[in-house]
Image (cartoon, rainbow, N blue to C red):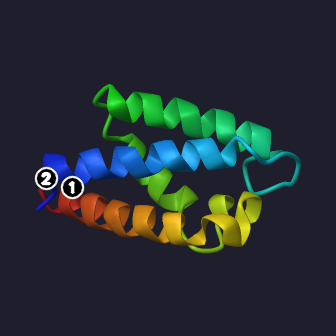
Amino acid sequence: MTTETDKKKLIELLDKAEHLAGQYSGGYSGQFLSAEEFHSALVDSITKLKNGDNSQLDKLDIWFLPTSCWDDFVGSDGQDLANQISDLLIKMTNDKTRK
């Protein structure tokens, strides 16, 4: 079961991810033409999640899966962080679909 503690921890990790993603530029990954574009979308999604829009969980889940957007732009520098985020997102999105 997803708890408020899970969401709080997720937001803390996402804030770290946002800071790290903001240090990259260029590149390409799927729907994003640059790291800057991904960073902007990440900031927007985190803000919406903080304001109660849990529909962002599915989008974030895809972005932080292995070999997805996060890995394409940040790479090994953010691998451990991405794994923590992905684990929480998988738990939270699985709980959401069972309700």
Left or right of 1 in this view: 90: right
Amino acid type, mark 2: Thr
Residue at x 71%, y 68% (from the top left corner): 75
Residue at x 26%, y 59% (from the top left corner): 92
Q: Secondary structure at mark 1?
A: helix
Image quarter of the C terminus: bottom left
Relative to 4, say whether 85 is above or below.
below
Q: Position of residue 23 (x, y in %)?
A: 75, 45
Question: Which quarter of the picture shows residue 11?
Answer: top left
Asked whether 19 or 70 is in front, the reply is 19
Image quarter of the N terminus: bottom left
Q: Are marks 2 and 1 in contact (CB under 8 Å)?
A: no
Asked whether 19 or 58 is in front, the reply is 19
Reading the chain from its start, which is encountered first: label 2 or label 1? 2
Relative to 45, say whether 8 is above or below.
below
The residue at which mark 2 appears reads as 3
- Nearer the observer, disc 2 or disc 1? 2
Amino acid type, mark 1: Lys
Residue 96's label in the rendered image is 1
Q: Residue furthest right?
A: 26
Question: Which quarter of the picture shows residue 8?
Answer: top left
Q: Position of residue 53 (x, y in %)?
A: 33, 32
Q: Position of residue 88 (x, y in %)?
A: 33, 63
Left or right of 18 in this view: 38: right
Asked whether 12 or 31 is in front, the reply is 12
Q: Position of residue 46 (x, y in %)?
A: 46, 36
Question: Which quarter of the picture shows residue 34?
Answer: top right
Residues at marks 2 and 1, CA–CA distance in whole angstroms: 11 Å
Q: Secondary structure at mark 2?
A: loop
Crowd rating for badge 1 (residues with CA inside 10 Å; few <14, some 14–19, many 20+)? some
Left or right of 76 in this view: 16: left
